[in-house]
Image (cartoon, helix red, strand yellow):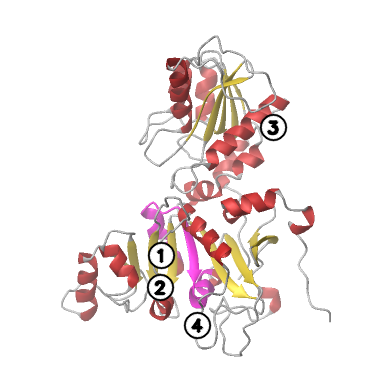
Amino acid sequence: MAGIPEQRCEANVDAGAQKAAPTALGADDARFMRHAIELAWRGWGWTNPNPLVGCVLVRDGRIIGEGWHEKCGQAHAERNALADCARRAADGATDAEHIDADAAPTADPARGHARGATAYVTLEPCCHTGKQPPCTEALIAAGVARVVVGSRDPNPLVAGKGSAQLREAGIRVDEDALRGECDELNPIFFRFISRKTPYVVAKWAMSADGKIACASGDARWVSGPESRRDTHELRHRLAAIAVGINTVMADDPLLTCRRENKPGNQPLRVVLDSRLRIPEDCALVRSCAQGEAPLAVATCASVDDPATDAGAKAQRLRALGVEVLRIPQDGADHVAVRPLLSVLGEKGIDSLLVEGGSGIHGAFFDEDAVDEAVVYLAPKVVGGADAPGPVAGAGAARMAEATVLGRPRAHTLGDDLKITFAPAGAARVADHTPASRDALDATTPAMQGGEACSPAS
């Protein structure tokens, strides 16, 4: 047990080495790039495994088009911004949107056309054909004069090639504009594109004395309604949720994303079930059969022969729409974490929210497979020697071997305290739920990154 690994992306570092000097930004450049960042956040939860990207087209100090990557498989941010520019022209718009509300509105004589404009893009434009055509071609064809780039794209298919292609077409390219803020958008993408395994967030709610349930097993509810709503935002953002079979047997959870007054992206629910004990009539299986949300069961049981009990059960589960994944077992005869992450990565799952229970959390921490941790701390004392804590597993034999979570950042959610942990300087997914963004924007410095307290000796 070493600690949460640093999130520095090797491919991103290589791309960054091409032109290490950051761009000197003017006030307008920073303002427009920050607007592009705000647009990018609108894709929260909908773009996996693609990155969050925003784009703003500006000419003569006015926005003439804007867009963001709205959903995986749909148009990228640059093409959406160009389409918005064309719509403004077709509609005969005479007053482009202003970031500075105090500025006097003036007519746009070019009627929204992008020729000669500056494009502010939070991530280097792509130059390859995937589900969408290259954005570099669209920017070149539109006749933009300058492209301001925030993050470097670590995708080997791009990785500096997009900016090079724009320069070859005679377009001025300024890179690393507000790079730190732009990088905050995409720790998941940077992790997945470079290592091909999911970005892992371990999450739990616990009482002030470190209990996730009473000794009786009752756990509803440890945290307050605000924390539970925040969890649904994380479920919306991350591509999959993992829980252990003991949690399924004890709580019969649904594990769907239920955002308040908003549509939600339903993550793949993954149950770690070494002996394939999952009840066929549990809420997870029923909701999968009804098409509400996908479900996969990771098992070590031999499921290939339908003549065996496990094989027959796997066949019935598959008939109900459940995906049964055969995963090797670890030394404790449980589903092995690293092979599971590899299989999920091969399926295009870029991120995983590990919701427990304690044995599953312990297995992920034992394998140093956690990238970020989020804790909802409730102002309650449960007590009881047999009441469970959030992390089991093999654990550390000595305090010097304990997992180091990284520097904490905290804010209140209703009566609870939400605490996130990640290496110093690393972007944190859990800090960007709507509630956390609002809270941290207004938080005093003393609440962010405070030093941990240790008992007096």
**What residue is shown with label 3?**
22
In the rendered view, does 397 fall on the left or right side of 242?
A: right
In front here: 63 or 300? 63
Type of the residue with mark 2:
Val
Type of the residue with mark 3:
Pro
- Kindly report the distance in space between the C-alpha atoms of the residues bearing marks 3 and 4: 53 Å
Type of the residue with mark 1:
Leu
Q: Residues within 10 Å of mark 4 (few under 14, many from 20)?
A: few
In front here: 137 or 355? 355
In what element is the residue under mark 3? loop
Do the CB atoms of the residues marked 2 and 1 lie less than 8 Å apart?
Answer: yes
- Kindly report the distance in space between the C-alpha atoms of the residues bearing marks 4 and 1: 29 Å
Which corner quadrant holds the C terminus?
Answer: bottom right
In what element is the residue under mark 4? loop
Mark number displayed over residue 340: 1
In the rendered view, does 297 fall on the left or right side of 310?
A: right
Q: Nearer the viewer, mark 4 or mark 1?
A: 4
In the rendered view, does 445 fall on the left or right side of 424?
A: right
Q: Which image quadrant is residue 100 in?
A: top right
**Residue at 42% across / 81% down in the picture?**
250
Q: Which image quadrant is residue 383 in?
A: bottom right
Disc 4 or 1, which lies upstream in sequence? Answer: 4
- Kindly report the distance in space between the C-alpha atoms of the residues bearing marks 3 and 2: 45 Å
**What residue is shown with label 4?**
218
**Where are the magenta residues, as a range?**
338-364
**Residue at 55% across / 65% down in the picture?**
225
**What residue is shown with label 2?**
335
Q: Is residue 361 magenta?
A: yes
Q: Residues within 10 Å of mark 2 (few under 14, many from 20)?
A: many
Which corner quadrant holds the N terminus?
Answer: bottom right
**Residue at 51% across / 41% down in the picture?**
42
Disc 3 or 2, which lies upstream in sequence? Answer: 3
